[in-house]
């Protein structure tokens, strides 16, 4: 017996950590874009939990990325189930595309169906969010990935206020120069203080305002790397809306000239704004 689920990823443009009285209240506020492609997860009944994380390369070959995922394993222990998990993604792992949140949401959505646990999407999201925060792999991606759109999160946690806008109808392009170690950034008081001070004073009402606020945040936060700086300067010279993928060593951009401007800097990933969150896409239960 097996079940397959998918979940979009999330590119965060800017964020600020928020600490609440309960685990579910911890997280972040900020803004970003929920994107496809995300993660596809196949879950099979097993006597012991195993996790295989696979990346689909540019030439559609499968590359084994990892054979463990402490967050996924922790979430399954919390549910009291053992399963064999296979996750597949086309975007680079750990590079600011919210794939850890997507993998958790897709895994728990599929596990819930396979084991007939009776959880609703809100319960699934709560477990995924608390697991992300506990393992310092993310703060607000799970909240965003509950549904699609360009999102502005003005409240932390799963139940925090989220506004969603469907105002990015074209392709979103990205280049990646590798991961930024998210737990190291999130556990650094000095870096988190700088991030908090860089947080934009006003929420963006339009996509253009979102990109502008994200660029300003990236600069003020001190997270911009030399590779990202070169790309952002090239985008600015051509009038292309762009910013840094948070938290990843890369750039995402939007507009007619975005692909052409990004192409000299490496492989360009094509994404689009997602319209829905995690969902079941197959299974033989």
Image: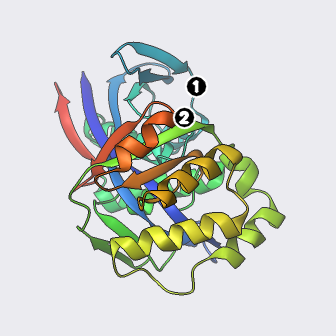
Q: Which residue is at the far front?
A: 237
Numbered mark located on residue 124 in the image: none
User: Dot 1: what SS?
Assistant: loop
For the C terminus, the image quarter is top left
**Image point (25%, 40%), residue name:** 113
Of 174 and 160, the residue lying toward us:
174
268 sits to left or right of 2: right
- In which image quadrant can residue 262 be found? top left
Vertical arrangement, residue 166 with respect to residue 88, above or below: below
- Using the image, determine if residue 81 lies above or below residue 214: above
Q: Position of residue 162 (x, y in %)?
A: 37, 75
Camera-side mark, 2 or 1: 1
Front-lying residue, 155 or 242: 242
Q: Residues within 10 Å of mark 2 (few under 14, many from 20)?
A: some
Quarter of the image with the N terminus is top left
What residue sits right under mark 1 in the picture? 68
Vertical relation: 70 (above or below) 30? above
Q: How many marks?
A: 2
Disc 2 element? helix
Relative to residue 263, is residue 277 drawn left or right?
A: left
Question: Percent position (x, y) of residue 197?
Answer: 71, 78
Name the residue tied to disc 2: 73
Lateral position of residue 159 relative to residue 266, left or right? left
The Cα atoms of the two marked residues, 2 and 1, are separated by 8 Å
- Mark positioned earlier in the residue sequence (2 or 1): 1
Q: Quadrant of residue 218?
A: bottom right
- Looking at the image, can residue 102 be seen? yes
| Badge 1 density bin: few <14, some 14–19, many ≥20, Cα 10 Å | some
Q: Give the residue drawn at x 78%, y 63%.
A: 191
Identity of the residue drawn at 73% across and 62% down: 222
Is there a contact, CB below 8 Å, between mark 2 and mark 1?
A: yes
């Amino acid at each position: 017996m097996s079940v397959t689920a998918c979940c979009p990823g999330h590119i965060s443009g800017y964020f600020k950590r928020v600490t609440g009285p309960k685990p579910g209240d911890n997280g972040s506020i900020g803004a970003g874009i929920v994107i496809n492609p995300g993660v596809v997860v196949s879950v099979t009944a097993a006597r012991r939990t195993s996790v295989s994380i696979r990346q689909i390369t540019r030439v559609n070959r499968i590359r084994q990325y990892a054979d463990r995922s402490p967050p996924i394993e922790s979430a399954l222990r919390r549910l009291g189930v053992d399963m064999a998990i296979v996750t597949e993604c086309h975007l680079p792992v750990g590079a600011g595309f919210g794939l850890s949140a997507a993998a958790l949401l897709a895994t728990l959505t599929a596990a819930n169906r396979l084991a007939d646990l009776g959880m609703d999407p809100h319960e699934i999201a709560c477990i995924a969010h608390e697991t992300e925060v506990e393992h310092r792999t993310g703060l607000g991606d799970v909240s965003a990935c509950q549904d699609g759109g360009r999102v502005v999160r003005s409240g932390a946690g799963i139940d925090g206020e989220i506004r969603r806008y469907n105002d990015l109808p074209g392709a979103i392009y990205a280049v990646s120069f590798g991961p930024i170690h998210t737990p190291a950034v999130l556990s650094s008081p000095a870096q988190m203080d700088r991030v908090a001070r860089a947080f934009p004073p006003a929420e963006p009402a339009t996509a253009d305002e979102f990109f502008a606020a994200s660029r300003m945040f990236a600069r003020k936060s001190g997270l911009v790397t030399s590779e990202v700086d070169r790309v952002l300067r090239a985008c600015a010279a051509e009038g292309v809306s762009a910013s840094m993928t948070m938290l990843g060593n890369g750039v995402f951009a939007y507009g007619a000239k975005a692909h052409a401007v990004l192409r000299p800097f490496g492989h360009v990933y094509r994404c689009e704004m997602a319209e829905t969150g995690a969902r079941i896409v197959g299974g033989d239960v």
